[in-house]
Amino acid sequence: MVFDALSRLEAEYDVRVIAARDTGSRAWGLADPDSDYDVGFVFAQSAAAYGKLGEYRASIDTRERDVELHGWNVKRFGELLADSNPSALELVHSPVSYTAHPAFDALAEDVAFAPLSLYHHYRSLAETNAARIRTGTATVKTNLYRVRGYCYARYVLDTHAFPELDFPRFLEEEADRFDEAVLTEARTLVDRKRAGEGEVSVGDAFGELSLPSEVDPREHAVEPPDIERINAFIESALAH
């Protein structure tokens, strides 16, 4: 299904898909029987398209039946990586690959990012779902996405590393970082989401989950993303 959708997209938009990975519930280990496919991808256009006015395309967003497709031109994707864009980083680190490219795969190992950018992204995910819970949308899904954001934000702040996107696996690998009560409830929500109970109301499953809104950037300064490394990936992608 995904491969056919990508092939049709290449023909319709006259592009070449360089790499494609899941960026939704399948990447997070939270898919249920009715989950759609959320596919992120990086694409290249012909050399002529980069040199002509009006032909460069920065992104593509489309849907085909149960497949949601969101892609970036390789040049735009490189710019997002250089800015530590969380969505671009999640695409690089997704454990579910549909179309592989060696240079793209290597990015997960050696492209640096700004930890605070990722921290605030996951803190926002936690707070957005906490607000939804307070206003009456207290489902399995909103509670699960809240605790996922909370755990990832804590992890990034503590380690400056990118978290394992498969959330059940992350909970097992990083169990020592979190209270047992939080882990137990999170695992229960994972099981219920996988069983198709994502929209079932459950109330506020966690109560207070505190994350600092202000963080001293001097304590979390790291080497910036390597522009030369990103440019090497772009050159490699365009050369094939």
Image: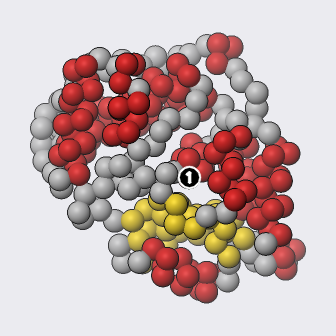
Residue drawn at (45%, 43%) of the image? 165
Residue drawn at (31%, 50%) of the image? 30
Q: Is residue 77 above or below residue 222?
A: below
Image quarter where the N terminus lies is: bottom left
Quadrant of the image occupied by residue 26: bottom left
Residue drawn at (68%, 78%) of the image? 15
- Say which of 97 and 14 sits in front: 97
Q: What amino acid type is highlighted by mark number 1? A: Leu
Residue corresponding to mark 1: 91
Q: Horizontal and vertical percent for residue 238?
A: 80, 68
Colour convention of the picture: secondary structure
The answer to whether residue 87 shows anywhere in this view is: no
Q: Horizontal and vertical percent for residue 39?
A: 48, 64
Please state if 139 lies on the left or on the right of 132 as rendered.
Answer: left
Q: Horizontal and vertical percent for residue 227?
A: 82, 43
Residue drawn at (41%, 30%) of the image? 173
- Say which of 235 and 128 sits in front: 235
Quadrant of the image occupied by residue 226: top right
- Say which of 90 and 207 sits in front: 90
